[in-house]
Amino acid sequence: MAGAVVDVVTTGYLTLDDLVLHDDRVVRDALGGGALYAAVGARIWGATVGIHACAGGDYPPRYLRRIEGGGIDTSGVTVGPERSLRLWLLEEDEARKQQLPKLASATVVEMDAKRGPLPDAYRGAAGFHVATSLPATQSAMVRAIRTAAPTASVTLDVWTESFFDAGLYRDPAFLAGVDAFLPSDKEVEAIWGLADLSERLRSLAALGPRTIAVKRGGQGSLVFDRSRDMFWEVPAVPVSAVDTTGAGDAYCGGFLAGLVVAGDPLDAALRGTVSASFVVEGHGAQAALGTDPSEAERRLAALRPRVRQVWP
Ligand SMILES: Nc1ncnc2c1ncn2[C@@H]1O[C@H](COP(=O)(O)OP(=O)(O)OP(=O)(O)O)[C@@H](O)[C@H]1O
Ligand SMILES: [Mg+2]
């Protein structure tokens, strides 16, 4: 699929993850990274997807072939530093989690520097998801996308980890040019606080995004649409969760695919929720590659009547 024009692009990291889960299970060498989980989430809805990321020189070629085998274009993956971005994903309990680059990892600074500009073949995409990377990199990427593709849909995720300063997210210019902002409740709490949440979301949406969806783990998500001044609660799909790593990223990818195919933010949130439900059923992004589209449609139809409007 080299150089193919794609419907949507995810830009961010491609990682190799070692997980210590809250119930003491340890999982080694899972295919991870926000760009990959989001691509998998978008692919579930039939969108053609390209990944704009950087892989370390030691990233196994068979892993890239596996991703391509799932129908995801990897022509936007550059080869960067010698080593891959290898993360410890550490869970203390279902709510307290942290990520830490391993001693044998490339740094996020190296990865951001080597990702390079958006490939020409991806500039015609209808949607772009800016997955987590250093805040300054994400900000520059949103601006670059807006210049290259002024009418495309742009979604943005954020993170707060100990190895970088998340303070830049508070810059009011950060959300300019973003159509949908998709943080988790933990990130909203850490960056802005959860008090007066409805007012907080209204004021953040006034900085740019038409839609904000706050991801709440097994509780689902809270969706705000500025153009209608409406809030909805979208519950999670009831599945047996094996590993929730990447659920937030898959939600973002499904959300973007929904924005591009359906154009409606609530429909987008439903698709994001369904995409996440497949990712939590297994370990690593590979688990949800090749998801059955009819099962995705079935989950979407079952979820739709469970949405509740709140704060009318
Ligand atoms: N246990 C679960 N069962 C079903 N769906 C889940 C579960 N946990 C999360 N999800 C779905 O995934 C979405 C995103 O999850 P979450 O809020 O954990 O994102 P996140 O904190 O950004 O995750 P991460 O950054 O680890 O990918 C939720 O809104 C929900 O729809
Ligand atoms: Mg997240």
Image: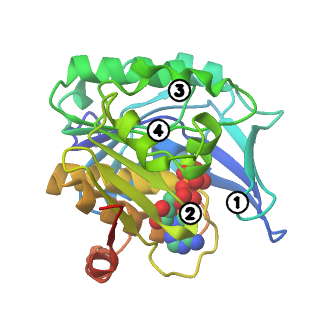
Disc 4 or 2, which lies upstream in sequence? Answer: 4
| Residue identifier under label 3 | 169
Between label 3 and label 4, give the one nearer the viewer. 3
> Which residue is identified by label 2?
217
Residue at image mark 1? 95
Q: Amino acid at mark 3?
A: Tyr
Residue 231's spot in the image, x, y percent? Answer: 33, 58
Please tell me whether mark 1 sits on a helix, a strand or a loop.
loop
| Dot 2 beta carbon under 8 Å from ligand 1 | yes
Q: Nearer the viewer, residue 4 or 172?
A: 172
Determine contact: label 3, label 1, CB under 8 Å.
Answer: no
* Sequence-first disc among 3 and 2: 3
Q: Quadrant of residue 41?
A: bottom left
Residue 131 is tagged as 4
Q: Is residue 80 above or below residue 43?
A: above
Q: Position of residue 15 (x, y in %)?
A: 61, 42
